[in-house]
Image: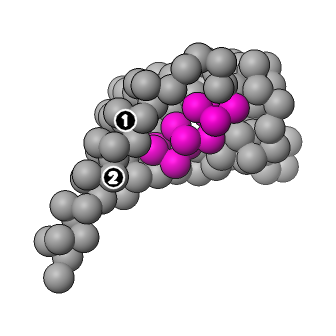
Amino acid sequence: MNGPLIVHKAEAVEAMQHADRLRPSAYQRTRVHRRDLLVERQLEPGHLKAACTTWHQALGDCPKVQSVRADDHAKAMFGLLRPHLKNATACDLYDRATVTSWLMPPRVNGRVDI
């Protein structure tokens, strides 16, 4: 039963990537939101490197977009990356997001929650 579902999810990721390539640059907000969804779909089967690449792209557009939903997705990234911080790609993304002025990782007792 899982076989066809996995195939459909893989096709969905491919379709989302194709749509992202075709989306005009003027649609920054839509691009950020769709990339956030793409990241979630990439992480589900464990495609961490692809998800990190997509997140890097989304981070590049986020400062240009005023969106609470995009901010929430970006903040959720810290929690999703936390289990993967021993991976160099994930660690690089985490570091880039941490130095981005509009986005800071969650704090617990005044310390960054890692």
Q: Who is closer to the viewer here, 79 or 10?
A: 10
Q: Quadrant of the N terminus?
A: bottom left
Compared with residue 114, is residue 28 higher up or lower down, i.e. above or below?
above
Which residue occupies 69% across, 32% down?
A: 29
* Magenta span of residues: 29-39
Q: Position of residue 54 (x, y in %)?
A: 45, 31
Callout count = 2
Q: Which mark is residue 108?
A: none
How would you rate the neighbour count of disc 2 (Cα within 10 Å): few for under 14, some for 14-19, many for 20 or more?
some
Along the line of sight, which residue is nearer the eye, 31 or 104? 31
Which residue is label 2 attached to? Answer: 12
The residue sitting at 62% across, 41% down in the picture is 33
The numbered mark, 2 or 1, whose residue comes first in the sequence reads: 2
Q: Quadrant of residue 103?
A: top right
Q: Position of residue 24 (x, y in %)?
A: 55, 20
Q: Is residue 1 visible?
A: yes
Q: Amino acid at mark 2?
A: Ala
Q: Secondary structure at mark 1?
A: helix
Tell me: 31 left or right of 39: right
Q: Nearer the viewer, residue 69 or 52?
A: 69
At horizontal 19% and vertical 61% (from top left) the residue drawn is 7
Q: Position of residue 13 (x, y in %)?
A: 33, 47
Amino acid type at mark 1:
Gln
Report the residue marked by disc 1. Answer: 17
The front one of 74 and 94 is: 74
